[in-house]
Image (tube, rainbow, N blue to C red):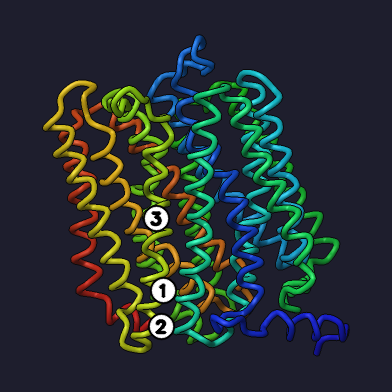
Amino acid sequence: MVSNPSLVETGEASLRRSPSRHPKSLWTLALTELWERFSYYGLQGILSFYLLYSLSEGGLALGAATTASIVGAYGGAVYLSQILGAWAADRLVPPRRLVLLGAVVITLGHLALALLPGTGGLAVGLVLIALGTGALKTNITSIVGMLYAEDRDRRDAGFSYFYMAINAGAFLGPVLTGITQSAWGFHLAFGLAAVGMVAGLIQYSLKMGALPAESAVVKNPVGRTGLLHALTVVAGGLVLAGLVWWTGLVDSENLVNVVTAVVFLAAAAYFTVMLRSPAVDTDEKRRIRGFLPLWLASTLYYGLLFQQFTTVAVFIDERVDLRVGSWEMPASWPGSASSLAVILVAPAVAALWIRMGSRQPVTAAKYAIGLGVIGAAYVLILLLSSLFPGQTVPALPLLLVLALAGTSEIFVGPMGLAVATRIAPRRFRNQTVALMMLALAGGSSLSGLLGTLYTAVPAGSYFALVGAVPLVLAVGLTLSAKRIDTLTR
C-alpha cells in the first residue's frame, strides 16, 4: 500500500498513453537521456584525440597504447560506478532523485574538463562524470522499465525508442564538439558538453513529478548499521585505490587491466548473490541463469562496438585521410556515423517488433543478428586497411562501415535492457539493470584492452580476429536461442 495519495496520482498520470500508445513519461525520460548522452558522447568523441594529439595541437601527447588504456578504463569506470547507483536507489535515495543528483555531478565534471588544464583537470573531470553517470544511468533505465510492467511485446519497442533518443544524443554530441574542437580547441568543446548536460538537467527537473510513483520510493531502506558498513567499504576501497596508484602498482598504461578485473569480479558476485539468495524464488533464479549467456554476449559485443573510441580512434589518427576535397573532416565525425545509423533505422525496427508481436525473433536471435552485423563491419575495415596502405584510407567508406556497425546496436542494446528489466527478481530490480551496465563496463574496458592489442600486432591480423569472433558467436546464439528464451520466460 502507498501511504502518500499524491504518489498514486503521479503514478497513474505517468502511465497515460500518448498517441503512439506509449506512456507519456517515456518521452520525458528519453529527452533527459538524449542530453546526458549528448554530453557523454560529445566528450567521448574527442577524448582519445585530446590524449593523442601533440601539445602544440592542444592535446596531451600520451601515445596510442596509453590512450587506449585510459579511455577504456574510464568507460569501464563510468558503467562500473552504476553498481553504486543501483544500490543507492534500492537502499538510500529514490531513483528519480538520484537521476537529478547524477545530472548535477556530471555537469560539474564537464566544467572541470573545460576550466582546469592538463592531467589534473582530466582526472577530476573524468572521476566526477563517472560518479554522476553511475547515479543517473541505471536508475533512468529502471524507471523506463517501470512504465511497461508486464507488457513484454511493447516493452521492446519502448526501449527501442528510448535507444533512439540515446543515439540522437550520441550522434549530435561528437558532431558539435568535433566542430567546436576543430575551430576553437578542446576546452571549449568540453564546455559545450557541459551545456548539453545543463539542458538535460533543466528538462528533467520540470517533468520529474510526473514519473511513476514507484520511482519515488526506496524499496529496501538500509539501517544505520548497514549504512556504516557500506561507507566503511567505500572508504577502504578509495584508500586502497590511492595507495596502489601512489606506489606505481597501477598506472595509466595498466589501469584498464585492473578495471576489467574489477568488472568481471563484480558481475560474478552479483550473479552469485542472486542465485543463492533466499529472497529470490525458483522461477526468478531460472531466469537469471538464462540471462547469463546473454550477459556474456553483451559484454563481448560492447567490447567490439566501443572500439570506435579506442582502436578506431587510433586507426583514424594513423591511417585515415580526413580530407574531402579541400575540406578536412573533424576527427570525431566518423564515430558519430554509428549513432546516426541507429537514429535512422531504430524506428523501423521498433515498428517491426510491434507488427510481428509474438512472432518476432526471441532475444538471443536478435543478439545473433547484431553480432553478425558488427563482425561483418570489422571484416570490411580489414578490406579497407588492405586496399589503402599508409595514411590513405578514405574517410567516406569508413563512415559507411561504421554506420553499418552502428545498426547492430539496435539488435543488442535495447533488447538487453528490456530483458534485464523483465527478468529482474523483485528484490534485485535495480541490481539486475546494473548487471547490464556491468556488461557495458566490461565492454568499455575490453575495448581498451583490444586497443592496446591493436598497437602490438599487424592491423590485418587484428581486424581478422575481431571480425571472426562475433560471427562465430552469432552462430552459437542462433543454435541456442530457443533454449535461452525458455529459461528467461
Are the residues flagged by discs 1 and 3 in contact, CB closer than 8 Å?
no
Query: In the rendered image, which quarter is residue 444 located in?
Result: top left
Q: How many neighbours does mark 2 have within 10 angstroms: few (below 14), some (14-19), or many (20 or more)?
A: some
Q: Amino acid at mark 2?
A: Ile
Of tags 2 and 3, the one toward the viewer is: 2
Q: Residue at x 49, y 50 (%)?
A: 441
Crowding near the residue tagged with mark 1, few <14, some 14–19, many ≥20 C-alpha atoms within 10 Å = many
- Which mark identifies residue 354? 2
In the rendered image, the residue lying farthest to the front is 326
Q: Badge 3 is on which residue?
A: 299
Drawn side of residue 236 relative to residue 467, left or right: right
Evaluate if marks 2 and 1 touch, with contact meaning CB atoms under 8 Å apart.
yes
Q: First in sequence, mark 1 or 3: give its number.
A: 3
Residue 152 placed where, x, y %? Answer: 47, 84
Element class at badge 2: helix
Foreground pick, 160 / 224: 160
Q: Position of residue 192 (x, y in %)?
A: 63, 36
Percent of width and height locating residue 217 = 78, 74
Q: CA distance from mark 2 to mark 3?
A: 27 Å
Quickly name the residue at label 1.
Answer: 350
* Residue closest to the eye, 252 or 261: 252
Q: Nearer the viewer, residue 422 or 193?
A: 193
Residue positioned 26% across, 66% down in the render: 369
